[in-house]
Amino acid sequence: QDMTEKELLKMELDQLKKEVKNERQMISKTGKELKEYIESMAGEDPLLKGVPEDKNPFKEKGGCTIS
Amino acid sequence: MCDQTFLAIVFGPCDKCSKEKPLRPVYIKSEQLSFCSLCVEMMATEGLQENETLASLKNEAESLKGKLEEERAKLHDVELHQVAERVEALGQFVMKTRRTLKGHGNKVLCMDWCKDKRRIVSSSQDGKVIVWDSFTTNKEHAVTMPCTWVMACAYAPSGCAIACGGLDNKCSVYPLTFDKNENMAAKKKSVAMHTNYLSACSFTNSDMQILTASGDGTCALWDVESGQLLQSFHGHGADVLCLDLAPSETGNTFVSGGCDKKAMVWDMRSGQCIQSFETHDSDINSVRYYPSGDAFASGSDDATCRLYDLRADREVAIYSKESIIFGASSVDFSLSGRLLFAGYNDYTINVWDVLKGSRVSILFGHENRVSTLRVSPDGTAFCSGSWDHTLRV
């Protein structure tokens, strides 16, 4: 990018001015919502609660038994 | 007799004020111009003013940054793990490698899952891009790129194509065909063109658009069919190393991370940066949205992973341990968002409890650094790719 240092700084300044105006919420609220999301989805999370061997698509391939 | 040099005084119209005066040579940006002495004086003082405005701009930037920090601090009323105090702690985890995919001749650099939850595309330093069936470990397709270090690859949502790129500065799309007679490379479509290496790529919600990140410091959105640049995203001060699209319900944004230690959240339609976060101490190698879209995690060379809450507009958790000194190359969440899997350059994968901030498990198995890691679309497994030439599921 061939912009002068001044132009780069101006861009950064404009961006910062915009960001300061962003709406923000308290962590007590957003953190709680993150936690609630996890709790609502945790029942469905296979990596969290484990998968029974018979339903696991990645279980080790069984050998053949010839009886 | 000694040679005498005379100052040759040129008389003519000044390049600046056009008046007829004795002129002096002046060099501006390596171009030689001729100014009259009055204009030379003015130039000198303007130069001073130039420096002043530069300094005052820098000061303004610093004070704005301070103000931003202040505003963000106001919301920091509580830590995430405090919010999660009453949440049940996670028990011991046993995660085993179920499949090892061997076939790459060199370091695996990137991988992606297909939406069918079983196919995987991976790319490596030797220029090979391979599509695997992770259930059977069979290789379904293989293509050799004309460049080495294929650092990015992605599966199309339809499962009918893959995109990849690297040192060739381009992102190319290959339709996947099951016809044995067709040469995959023949159908290759060059979509994106950057001025430096391609570090990351991802299809948007459809096969029609691709988002790319490059060592040239920019991200870009392309139309696959025409190869046209739809939007470009400028703002990173150095190479962009990673990107992730927001889950479709939350709208048209994506997050990118770069060598400038910043993670930036962009609006895909306007090209504007919405938020930026600069709390890492080193390059950000990987960014991944939290499943709900309200937060994202990042992994960095500073050996930490961090969680940023988009609505609180700040970092809310750091996942690190004194014993972990190697950079994190790749991060991904489990389906619910409770677990964060992170691959590190010390050959291990650490599993973190997102809410409590503690490490739940450490996985060994790779014989070289873990370069890429993705959880499968239905969350039943995750795949890690490594410089040891293998992928593990």
Image (cartoon, coloured by chain):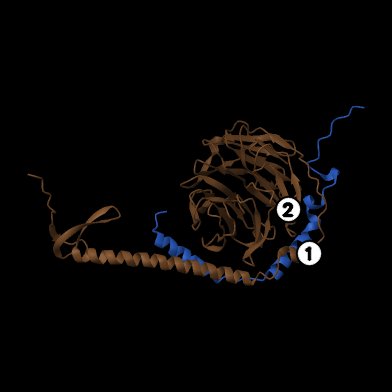
User: Looking at the image, which is closer to me, B286 or B219?
Assistant: B286
Evaluate whether residue B293 shows in this view.
no
* 2 and 1 marks on the same chain: yes
Q: Residue at x 56, y 60 (%)?
A: B266
Q: Which residue lies under the disc numbered 1?
A: B85
Quadrant in which the C terminus of chain A appears: top right
- Chain drawn in brown: B
* Residue B260 location (% of width, % of height): 53, 54
Q: Please name whichever residue, B199 or B176, is drawn nearer the observer in this view of the structure.
A: B199
Disc 2 is attached to a residue of which chain? B
Name the mark on residue B112.
none
- Describe the element under mark 1 as helix, strand or loop: loop
Position above or below: B47 against A67:
below
Q: Residue B330 placed where, x, y %?
A: 64, 48
Q: CA distance from mark 2 to mark 1?
A: 16 Å
Q: How many marks?
A: 2
x then y, percent, for residue B316: 67, 63
Say if A10 sits above or below B359 in the image.
below
> Which residue position is annotated with label 2?
B352
| Secondary structure of residue under mark 2 | strand
Give the amino acid type for the residue marked by disc 2 in the picture: Trp
Task: Specify the subunit that label 1 lies on.
Answer: B
Q: Nearer the viewer, residue B233 or B1?
A: B1
Q: Quadrant of residue B41?
A: bottom left
Place of residue A12 in the rendered image (x, y in percent of width and height, measured from the top left):
47, 63
Circle nearer the N terminus (2, 1): 1
- In this rendering, position of residue A14 left or right of residue B19: right
Question: Mark 1: which amino acid?
Answer: Glu
**Label 2 neighbour load within 10 Å: few <14, some 14-19, many 20+:** many
- How many C-alpha atoms fall within 10 Å of the one at disc 1: few (<14), some, or many (≥20)? few
Q: Which chain does the blue colour mark?
A: A
